[in-house]
Image (spheres, helix red, strand yellow):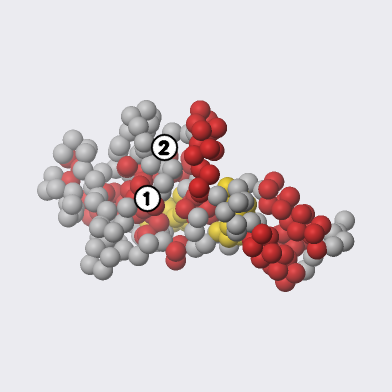
Amino acid sequence: MCPTNLQEAQAAIEAILFAASFPLRAEEIASAIGVDESSTRKLLRLIGDRHSSPESGVALVETGGGFIMLSRPEYAPYIERLSERQRPPSLSPASLETLAIVAYRQPVTRGEIERIRGVSPDSAISTLLERGLICEKGRKESIGRPILYGTTPDFLLYLGLSSLDDLPVLPDGEGLPADAPQGADEQDALMSPLPGLGKDGDEAGGNAHWDMPDGIDLESMFDGMSATDANCDEEDD
């Protein structure tokens, strides 16, 4: 079955995007409706233009190399009111910091994250894996072959980014500490105290944490993911 006219083709694409729970590539949409990819991209532009008006409650968004229909940000309060009881626990500051480190330094190991934050990231990594925001990206060719972590397409989707290149640029001279020495043991070489953590590192009651440099606001970047009240059931690492 193929669309017989322009309006039917646009309607078919909208139906597909409405039913999808993740971004679809142009070639996937083209295959589904039986139209060539070039024509599909033109149809996507027409749909995007039609939903670009503020009067539309949804918008066509290109993210993670694909397209998806999303509600417009200005109508978020209405959606939040409806889904308030079904909303999963928000991410804690520890998980937000870990997510930012993975985003900017991927692929990165658990030991490298621990070196940067000064505390164990195990709980935060487990949470981020469970939420589908990070995933395993293989193993590092070093002692013990530790697992490498990176962000997922869902991470880009939540932030409304097309690619990692759209992440805010870290200010010069600030940001994430340098990599650990090559070949060093991850359990020992990665645990030296760092600026912003205090001289006691993670021995100061487990409350030390990495300070995000000026100009990078985690709560703004990950709006909707951050902890908003004391009911969040995830503890800081």
Q: Is residue 223 left or right of residue 182?
A: right
Q: Quadrant of the C terminus?
A: top left
Residue that numbered label 1 is attached to = 220
Q: Position of residue 8 (x, y in %)?
A: 81, 57
Q: Nearer the viewer, residue 156 or 199?
A: 156
Q: Is residue 180 left or right of residue 20?
A: left
Q: Secondary structure at mark 2?
A: loop
Check disc 2 and give the amino acid type: Ser
Q: Nearer the viewer, residue 34 or 103?
A: 34
Residue contact between numbered discs 1 and 2, judged by CB atoms under 8 Å? no
Q: Quadrant of the N terminus?
A: bottom right
Check disc 1 and give the amino acid type: Ser
Residue at figure coordinates x 41%, y 37% from the top left? 90
Residue at the front extreme, as displayed: 55
Residue that numbered label 2 is attached to = 90
- Disc 2 crowd rating (10 Å Cα; few below 14, some 14-19, many 20+) is some
Q: Which mark is drawn over residue 118? A: none
Residue 66, quarter of picture: bottom right
Distance of mark 1 from mark 2, alpha carbons? Answer: 14 Å
Q: Which tag, 1 or 2, sits closer to the chain's start? A: 2
Q: Secondary structure at mark 1?
A: helix
Residue at figure coordinates x 50%, y 55% from the top left? 160
Residue at the bottom extreme, as displayed: 38
Closest to the camera, between mark 1 and mark 2, is: 1
Residue at figure coordinates x 23%, y 67% from the top left? 173
- Disc 1 crowd rating (10 Å Cα; few below 14, some 14-19, many 20+) is few
Q: Is residue 60 left or right of residue 134?
A: right
Q: Nearer the viewer, residue 98 or 183?
A: 98
Q: Position of residue 227 (x, y in %)?
A: 37, 37
